Amino acid sequence: MTTDTMNGNGRTTGRGIGLAAMRGLALALVSLPGAVLCFCLSLVSIALIPIGIGIVTTPYVLTGVRAFANSRRVLAAEWGGVRITPAYRPLPKDANPWARTFGMLRDPATWRDLRWLPVDMTAGFVTALLPAALLLYPLEGFALAIGLWRVFPDGYWYGFVPVTGQASAFGAAALGAVLLFLAHFLTPRLLGFHFRLTRAVLGSNQRELAERVRFLTETRRDAVDASAAELRRIERDLHDGAQARLVAVGMDLGTIEALLDKDPAQAKELIAQARKSSVEALSELRELVRGIHPPVLAERGLGDAVRALALRLPVATEVSVDLPGRAQAPVESAAYFAVSEVLANAVKHSGADRIWIDLHRADGMLRATVTDNGKGGAVIGAGSGLAGVERRLGTFDGVLAVSSPAGGPTMVTMEIPCA
Amino acid sequence: MRVVLAEDLFLLRDGLVRLLQAHGFEIAAAVESGPELAAALAELDPDVAVVDVRLPPTHTDEGLQCALGARRQRPGLPVLVLSQHVEQLYARELLADGTGGVGYLLKDRVFDAEQFVDAVRRVAAGGTAMDPQVIQQLLARRSGDDRPLARLTPREREVLELMAQGRSNAAIAGKLVVTERAIAKHTANIFAKLGLEVSDDDNRRVLAVLAYLDHGR
């Protein structure tokens, strides 16, 4: 997915090695104080939240941490070819400090940042410094061989070589040459390792994201398909039903106009017919509206809409509702139609003579349970109404669970997040 | 007879005002929102209120809530609720206090001016006027199982339906083109089969029927 070595094809040049070393050195010099400063400020600021000061300062400090982490993301991409996706949750622009502070603290990305800081000031610092050291240290060996050894009359350890005279200084140079040879291979890799380490700690879970994207794509396609089919149905119903009837009313009125003087009796008959057509058109429109968004749902919300639904069932139904406030309209609508479909299934197939509906909301979840005392055996599968319900709920990240042993009873539980 | 009218659509409001005036009602006020309705009901003390369920500012069931609120202030205040759709839930809420003088009709019923005006008069007199759709839903719900309703003859079911709408024996007789005595016989049979107390009071009759339909499982 990303290239991890400096110049992509694995071939390293002398200039590339020098560049990697310089970059490593720069990274080490900036990351250590930066990470320490960010980490300390964050700790202090979060610790001060209970006495109120932290609520004001934390958003600023965390914004600084994000800027620091983002600068590292940019460097990782530019210098190491390692892409680290930032995944911060958006905050409303006009949020007060309280909402900003806790909004940021609830974001897992914030905690990834804070976890990354100590890693960066230790392992990150070392892996950034090593490429530079690997290139600079051999230079010292050569310098010793050229004559630097004279500065240390009491002897000097270069690596594992004790430098006491020109001969051993040449040994140091040889070691330097070996190190330089190693650096040729290792420097870019070490820097790449540094960025991969950063990604491992700082990056969000890519697989999880990919999985989520796949799921959302699928449910969006379902939703688009379903709404397109719904629109076609509405168009067809309007065209064949109410619209046709209104046209008939118009024609009747035209005929009545012509007949009014000639044949009042027949005109009167036609008036009655026109009125009947208009009443039928209205009742068809009413049915259509009920199918799109039931009026009682718009007027009273989910609880009473389900109660009203239960009143129309031919089976004795008990409804218990515990819904503080109202959920968003699309969520309410999805829940209503899901419950409605499950109830229709229960009435049609279960052979039950009692149904219990329970609606409640807790922990940001809207949960609807439909239980009947019928003969059971309901399954979610291709072609069953429950599969449609499951798709409908899927659009809202909702889930459907069915417990229906043969012989009954059947219990269908639906859950939709509605934070 | 003084009427307070609440309807947010200008065309319908205008039409209702003219319709009611043509039939000799006095329009005390014709308002278009919930708060205006509440104020008018409190100040004008009308003989009957004709109210649309859905009113501004909330465009939900503001009109119904206003009517129920006004009836709590003044028990028995006659209220006829009009709606674009009928919902049993609302019908029950209107009937719940058991004092009568309530009506709940589809707006379409206005098409039949005579029937509509008759319903307004019945409600103003303390009777009830339930939309046939409410009653049909209730009856349809019961007919599926072998409960007492299934023992009614088709004619008796017709009579029960009209009775539950709030009509008197005379009106039912007129509608079915039979004598009033025949209706009296039918109603006695119905009450016997359903196990309801016989009562001469029109209003209590409807409440008894609805109570049966509601709880007589």
Image (spheres, rainbow, N blue to C red):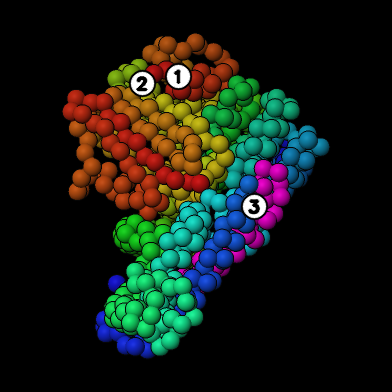
Q: Quadrant of the N terminus of chain A?
A: bottom left
Depth check, mark 1 against mark 3: the one in front is 3
Indicate yes or no whether the magenta region holds residue A78. no
Q: Main secondary structure of the magenta part?
A: helix
Marked residue chain, label 1: B
Residue at image x 37%, y 61%?
A: A200
N-terminal of the two: label 1 or label 2? 2
Image quarter for residue A215?
bottom left
Counting the numbered discs, the total is: 3
Residue drawn at x 44%, y 36% is: A306
Q: Is residue A200 above or below residue B187?
A: below
Q: Which mark is residue A45?
A: 3
Q: Looking at the picture, which amino acid does disc 3 mark?
A: Ser
Q: For the residue labelled by badge 1, is the local secondary structure a helix, a strand or a loop?
A: helix
Q: Is residue A54 magenta?
A: yes
In the drawing, does residue B101 fall left or right of residue A138?
right
The front one of A293 and A90 is: A90
Q: Which residue is nearer to you in this view: A215 or A188?
A: A188
Q: Which residue is painted at 62% across and 38% down in the image? A: B64
Crowding at mark 2 (Cα within 10 Å: few <14, some 14-19, many 20+): many
Determine which of the numbered discs, if any, sits on residue B149 in the image: 2
Chain letter behind tag 3: A
What residue sits right under mark 1 in the picture?
Answer: B215
- Which residue, as the protein is rendered here, is positioned at the far right? B43
Secondary structure state at the residue bearing disc 2: helix
Q: Nearer the viewer's eye, disc 3 or disc 2?
A: 3
